[in-house]
Image (spheres, helix red, strand yellow):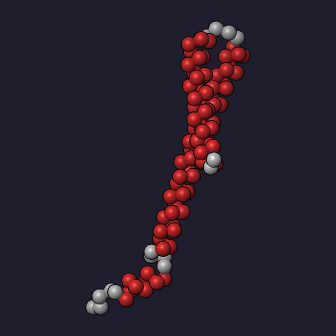
């Protein structure tokens, strides 16, 4: 399993956990209970949600990095290649 798949799975699990916590908190807990218990409960919810967002940003940055690496590779194979530049100069019409 690649690292990208691992953090995608972890992000999905964190997002699922935060959705479950949000549903349970509203449907079952409401505003009953001690304020400390509610603060800890919603703190865990917020932590799960922040972890999911962090992993989504990590994934976006990784995809952007792969895209930049591939762009550089393609550039180096074409315009970055000395042989390609020489062939372009050779085939330019003379004026």
Residue lying farthest to the top in this orientation: 32
* Vertical comparison of 91 with 59: above or below: below
Q: Residue at x 40, y 85 (%)?
A: 87
**Residue at 64% in and 22% down:** 42
Q: Observer-nearest residue: 67 or 57?
A: 67
| Residue in view at x 30 percent, y 91 percent | 94
Placement of the C terminus among the 4 image quadrants: bottom left
Which residue of the protein is positioned furthest toward the front in this rendering? Answer: 1
Residue at the limit of the structure toward the bottom, as seen here: 95
Whether residue 16 is visible: yes
Q: Is residue 58 visible?
A: no
Judge whether 10 appears above or below 25 on screen. below
Above or below 44: residue 88: below
Q: Quadrant of residue 17?
A: top right
Q: Residue at x 60, y 17 (%)?
A: 25
* Residue 53 on image: x %, y %: 58, 38
Percent position (x, y) of residue 31? 61, 10
Horizontal and vertical percent position of residue 85: 43, 82
């Amino acid at each position: 399993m690649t690292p990208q798949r691992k953090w995608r799975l972890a992000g999905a699990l964190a997002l699922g956990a935060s959705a479950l916590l949000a549903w349970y908190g509203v449907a079952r807990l409401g505003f009953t209970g001690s304020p400390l218990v509610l603060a800890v409960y919603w703190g865990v919810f917020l932590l799960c949600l922040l972890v999911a967002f962090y992993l989504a940003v990590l994934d976006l940055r990784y995809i952007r990095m792969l895209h930049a690496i591939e762009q550089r590779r393609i550039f180096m194979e074409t315009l970055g290649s000395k042989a390609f530049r020489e062939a372009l100069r050779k085939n330019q019409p003379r004026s």
